[in-house]
């Protein structure tokens, strides 16, 4: 049953109730109790088929719902696992991003410090240049020769002998500035290298976080899809159960009608001289099997309701024999029974032969035991060729195997 079938089933139920009303109307118009009971029983058979279909569909839907629930639990577990992994990666990313920000701030501070030291160094160099010019003008030739031969001002500054001629205070200032500048430059280079590694690390972790987030989102989408499927399946199961309960309620009502009609049949038999009481015991010669075949469905409860006869498997066209001698009280179409013959054997005992492909006797005709009354078929509510055989005592169905 599809998830959107609830309304059509309600319509079908309404039509079934309408059909029952029409049956009663037809009875009022002149149908016999036997005809009326056959119509009601046919409706009962139809409803039982619908109930069985609903039961099977409920079983399928319940199985599907259980499967969806299991998949949903697995999907939820996968989402939680993925979320845990994502939380871990994002925490790691936050830590590394914090470290990168710290390195960035440190690099900016070192850059500012290096620029300040470079400015101080240039100032110190300017002072020393002024000192050198004084020395150039005032010192002896050997010092001048050294100054001329130096390849760079740094070489002049590094020369201990030359620095010894400069004032001790200027010497200390120049050396301190030079050392601080070199240290700042080294620190800045080291920080730049560390920061470059940190940028690469953050990029890798960011990619991992993006991938983990994508996996989590994909799993969450699958979980949400399963959640929707679970809701739809649960709704379908509810609809099927509700429809089945509605059919069961109608079957209960029709079963009561069938019982009332059985009493009417007994009255009809009494009016025809068949008698109103009797033990239902077979005649001295006993009943014979009405057809050669195998019993494929016995008397008793089926689909939660009573199956009032036995089904004997046989190929289409196989002769159906009267189980005992008697008088035909019905020969014709009987709703769910299809082509049907009913034989009254006296003492409140009657037999019914349903689903025939052809009927060979008429109402009022006396038949002998073993006489062919019909041919096997699949008319009415039937899934294939077979004989549905009933034994009724005073209108009440009993197990035919007790008489065969």
Image: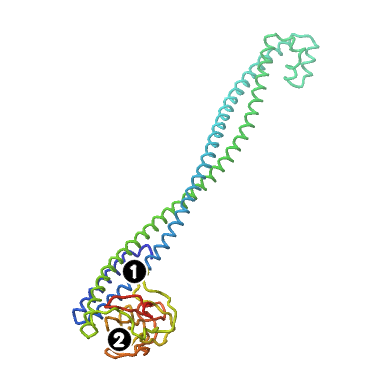
**Pick the front one: 81 or 311:** 311
Q: Quadrant of the C terminus?
A: bottom left
**Pick the front one: 336 or 344:** 344
Residue 228: mark in rendering:
none
In the picture shown, does residue 164 fall above or below 17? above
Extreme residue in the front direction: 284
Q: Which residue is mark 1?
A: 305
- Looking at the image, residue 166 sits to the left or right of residue 240; the answer is right
- Looking at the image, residue 351 sits to the left or right of residue 180; the answer is left
Figure quadrant of residue 1: bottom left
Q: Which residue is rendered at x = 25% and y = 76% of the image?
A: 262
Q: Which residue is rendered at x = 66% and y = 22% of the image?
A: 183
**Pick the front one: 56 or 310:** 310
Q: Which residue is rendered at x = 46% and y = 52% of the image?
A: 72
In the picture shown, does residue 191 fall above or below 117? below
Is the residue marked by circle 2 packed among few (<14), some (14-19), or many (20+) residues within 10 Å?
Answer: many
Q: Residue 260 location, x and y as percent?
A: 23, 74
Q: Secondary structure at mark 2?
A: strand
Q: Which residue is mark 2?
A: 331
In the picture shown, does residue 41 fall above or below 246? below
Q: Secondary structure at mark 1?
A: strand
Is the residue marked by circle 1 packed among few (<14), some (14-19), or many (20+) residues within 10 Å?
Answer: some
**Pick the front one: 280 or 138:** 280
């Amino acid at each position: 049953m599809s998830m959107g079938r609830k309304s059509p089933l309600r319509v079908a139920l309404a039509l079934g109730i309408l059909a029952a009303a029409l049956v009663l109307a037809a009875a009022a118009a002149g149908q016999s109790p036997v005809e009326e009971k056959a119509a009601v029983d046919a409706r009962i058979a139809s409803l039982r088929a619908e109930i069985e279909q609903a039961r099977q569909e409920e079983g399928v839907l319940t199985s599907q719902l259980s499967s969806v629930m299991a998949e949903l639990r697995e999907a939820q577990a996968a989402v939680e696992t993925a979320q845990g992994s994502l939380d871990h990666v994002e925490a790691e990313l936050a830590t590394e991003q914090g470290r990168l920000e710290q390195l960035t701030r440190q690099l900016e501070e070192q850059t500012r410090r290096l620029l300040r030291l470079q400015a101080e160094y240039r100032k110190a160099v300017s002072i020393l240049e002024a000192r050198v010019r004084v020395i150039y003008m005032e010192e002896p030739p050997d010092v001048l020769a050294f100054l001329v031969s130096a390849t760079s001002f740094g070489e002049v500054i590094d020369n201990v002998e030359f620095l010894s001629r400069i004032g001790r205070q200027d010497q200390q200032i120049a050396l301190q500035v030079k050392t601080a500048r070199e240290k700042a430059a080294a620190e800045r280079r080291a920080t730049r290298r560390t920061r470059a590694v940190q940028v690469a690390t953050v990029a890798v972790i960011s990619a991992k976080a993006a991938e983990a987030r994508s996996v989590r989102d994909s799993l969450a989408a699958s979980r949400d899809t399963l959640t929707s499927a679970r809701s739809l399946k649960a709704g379908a199961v509810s609809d099927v159960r509700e429809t089945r309960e509605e059919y069961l309620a109608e079957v209960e009502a029709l079963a009561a009608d069938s019982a009332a009609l059985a009493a009417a049949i007994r009255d009809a038999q009494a009016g025809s001289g068949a008698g109103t009481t009797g033990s239902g015991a077979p005649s001295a010669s006993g009943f014979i099997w009405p057809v050669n075949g195998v019993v494929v469905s016995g008397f008793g409860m089926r689909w939660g309701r009573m199956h009032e006869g036995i089904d004997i498997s046989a190929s289409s066209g196989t002769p159906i024999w009267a189980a005992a001698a008697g008088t035909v009280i019905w020969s014709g179409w009987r709703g769910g029974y299809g082509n049907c013959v009913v034989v009254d054997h006296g003492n409140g005992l009657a037999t019914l032969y349903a689903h025939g492909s052809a009927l060979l006797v008429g109402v009022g005709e006396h038949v002998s035991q073993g006489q062919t009354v019909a041919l096997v078929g699949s008319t009415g509510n039937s899934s294939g060729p077979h004989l549905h055989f009933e034994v009724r005592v005073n209108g009440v169905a009993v197990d035919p195997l007790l008489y065969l």
